Amino acid sequence: MATDQGKRSCARCAHYFITHDARFPYGCRAMNFKSQRSPQEEIVAATGAQCVSYEPRIAVRRR
């Protein structure tokens, strides 16, 4: 997903995670679900709107 077109990228969201379930590899903690596609794609398909739970992931600097 391209963020420059107004779409939010799940990979840059604090709620996004990769699961250990091979059938449903992508997940969203805010919406509490796992899916075969990116959570953003599932939300747009179901509601027709962008995700309202998006929060930018905070980068952690390691020393």
Image: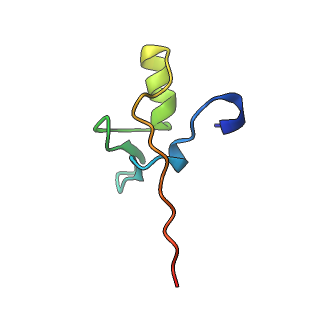
Residue that sits furthest to the right in the current view: 4
Residue for point 57% across, 35% down: 8
Residue that sits furthest to the top in the current view: 48
Q: Residue 26: x percent and y percent?
A: 43, 45
Residue for point 53% across, 48% down: 11
Residue that sits furthest to the left in the current view: 32
Tell me: residue 9, above or below residue 21.
above
Q: Residue 6: x percent and y percent?
A: 65, 29
Tell me: residue 10, above or below residue 41.
below
How many numbered marks are there? 0
Residue 24 appears in view: no
Residue that sits furthest to the bottom in the current view: 63
Q: Residue 15: x percent and y percent?
A: 38, 46
Near-viewer residue (61 or 25): 61
Residue 9: name its quadrant: top right
Q: Residue 39: x percent and y percent?
A: 45, 35
